[in-house]
Image: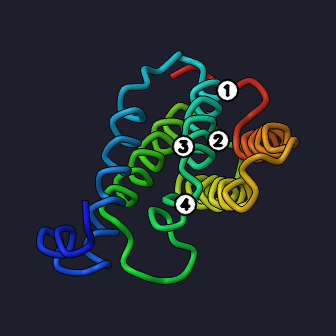
Amino acid sequence: MQLPTLYHFFGDKQRLLDAVVAASLDQYLEHKQGLQSTGDPRADLRRGWDLHVGFARQNPAIYPLMFPLRPSPEPQAATLSREMLRAGFHQLARAGALRSGVTAELATRSLSAALRGVATTICENPHHRDNSRLSATVRDAVIDALLHEESPTT
């Protein structure tokens, strides 16, 4: 397809990029929403983290557009993804699984910040041999900091 044809359908480059981001986010959310709880909060958080990092690794050019680091209007699906995470942490808070002093909001912000940092780092060098170890190390450290040692099942 030639540029004039693309611009006919999308109007300009930004609208084309917005359409690519929206389609990619929809695909990501479809996978995320399809995850069934294992009943183990740590396992569920690890799986969600691994899904997110895996998506970033497979889409290093698109990920920064989906989850921009600079202040800009966030794509609606990215907001929905964070709201799903926040809802999960509220559920964990009600179950008494969060460490003392850790609120659902703090847990959401903490995990989101670490996850975006790891995913962005991986996107910068998606074939680095230590990417899997980097992700697992940060993931486990953050989850351990947020949840009690033996979290109640949800």
First reached walking from the N terminus: tag 3 or tag 4: 3
Residue linked to disc 4: 61
The answer to whether residue 145 shows anywhere in this view is: no
Identity of the amino acid at label 3? Phe
Q: Can you tell which of label 3 and label 4 is closer to the viewer?
A: 4
Q: How is the image coloured?
A: rainbow
Q: Can you tell which of label 4 and label 1 is closer to the viewer?
A: 4
CB atoms at circles 2 and 1 under 8 Å apart? no
Q: Is residue 15 left or right of residue 72?
A: left
Residue linked to disc 1: 151
Mark 4, residues whose alpha carbon is within 10 Å: few (<14), some, or many (≥20)?
A: few
The answer to whether residue 70 shows anywhere in this view is: yes
What's the distance in space between the residues labelled 2 and 1, CA to CA? 8 Å
Identity of the amino acid at label 1? Ser
The quadrant of the picture occupied by the N terminus is bottom left
Residue at the spot 28% in from the left edge and 69% down from the top edge: 16
Residue linked to disc 3: 55
Mark 1, residues whose alpha carbon is within 10 Å: few (<14), some, or many (≥20)?
A: some
Q: Can you tell which of label 2 and label 3 is closer to the viewer?
A: 3
Q: Is residue 127 left or right of residue 52?
A: right
Farthest front residue in view: 2
First reached walking from the N terminus: tag 2 or tag 1: 2
What's the distance in space between the residues labelled 4 and 1, CA to CA? 37 Å
What's the distance in space between the residues labelled 2 and 4, CA to CA? 35 Å
Q: SS at mark 3?
A: helix
